[in-house]
Image: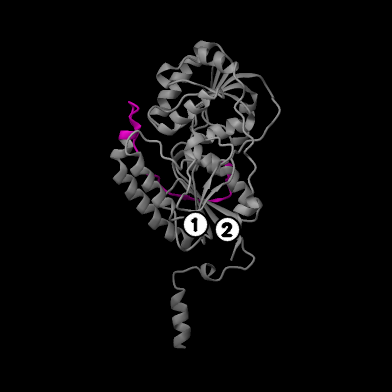
Amino acid sequence: MFVFCQFLNFFKNRSIFKYFRNVNSKKRILVAPLDWGLGHASRCIPIAKVLQKEGFEVVFATSGRALELLIKEFPKNDFIKLEGYNITYPKNGQMAVSMLSQLFKIWKSIRKEHIQLQQIIEDYNIDGVISDNRYGLYSKKVPCVFMTHQLKIQSPIFSETLQKINFKYIKKFDECWVPDSNKHSLSGQLSNANNTPFKCRYIGALSRFEKLEKTEDLDILAIVSGPEPQRSIFEELLKKQLIASKLKALLVLGKTEENKEEEIESLKLVSHLSAKSLNQQMVNADVVISRSGYSTVMDIAKLHKKAIFVPTPGQTEQLFLAKYFYDKNMAFAMHQKELDIQHAFQKAKNLSPLTSDNFEVDWHDLLSLFKSE
């Protein structure tokens, strides 16, 4: 009787399912993108779809507009609100200095999410983790993957120190997935790091989009994204210039929490589009205007579109990518304060589309990490 009572006490306030899982139950993978803009969340969409197709259950963990985006795309999945690093962004574009001043706050957030993950694994029966640029989501309990395209930190100051910190955290994961090719790179020197002190796999570029036929003619698709206050500054700049241009344009505001539409002369504004609708409108457009975030770059390259890149002021990674494609005549680029849409549109129209054929991913090999018992 004593043994039986001890057995019952062991399960008190616990789910029996947690300890005796059905042998036929699906393995559960936590997919956790960083919530800086929508790029990290959007490139996790194709990963989540493949995971589900391969028989896994996907649980998402993020916050803000990234969370709203994923809820709209996967309404039946489980979601965990996992706060980001609560970074504040400057209006003057001095991003590097601002980020360095907030390193202690970032470190505290990384430590906090690491502790939270251990409980999430227990509470949600997690069998594996895919973390898109969230440095604290590693654990010895289950296989954990860190996904990033930026192995080489772009910073005007303390780049060597930041690089060491970057690698120190990535080493804590079982694998690092780089959404690019190491032979025909789309991200240039950002992902080109030799002799990394961790297992690094170049998995190929990722995009949630597919090649489609045009359904209407559109001069410009303009996409607003990224953190505040620069997101709103960019929105107002695009709105003003697109109206003045008289070009047929669609401006997508990236406000996943809203569902509004407005037409002003030849410009249509929408708060947010589903992945399917955004895919179609990008196909329809002659030119895409956007930030030069890597996830957007991959979407544009997948659909072979002509592009105008306007990097977020002070964001060194976006500045690097915009210059990289501009120098190669693969896209037109302008600084935000110098943006002239009429001029940029004509320049971009005369360029060849931005293309890449690096979208073949060996999912069977990659996901074997989570299939082993």
Which residue appears at 60% of the width and 52% of the height? 366
Q: Against 244, is 165 above or below? A: below
Residue 320 lies in what quarter of the image? top left
Q: Assess whether residue 303 is covered by the magenta stretch.
A: no
Question: Looking at the image, can residue 80 be seen?
Answer: yes
Q: Quadrant of residue 22?
A: bottom right
Identified at 44% across, 28% down, the residue is 319
Which is more N-terminal, label 1 or label 2?
1
Q: Residue furthest bottom?
A: 1
**Which quadrant holds residue 12?**
bottom left
Find disc 1 in the rendering and name its residue. Answer: 174
Q: Quadrant of the C terminus?
A: bottom right
For image coordinates 48% across by 84% down, the residue present is 4
User: What's the distance in space between the residues labelled 2 and 1, CA to CA?
Assistant: 9 Å
Question: Residue 341: image x %, image y %?
Answer: 50, 15
Q: Residue at x 34, y 27 (%)?
A: 91
Q: Which residue is mark 2?
A: 369
**What amino acid does circle 2 point to?**
Leu
The spot of residue 313 in percent (x, y) is: 39, 27
- Badge 1 local density, few (<14 within 10 Å), some, or many (20+)? some
The range drawn in magenta is 73-97
Between 188 and 283, the one lying in front of the other is: 188
Amino acid carrying label 1: it is: Asp
- Vertical position of residue 322 compared to residue 178: above or below: above
Contact flag, marks 2 and 1 (Cβ < 8 Å) = yes
Question: Circle 1 sits in a helix, a strand or a loop, which is it?
Answer: loop
Is residue 291 visible in this depiction of the protein? no
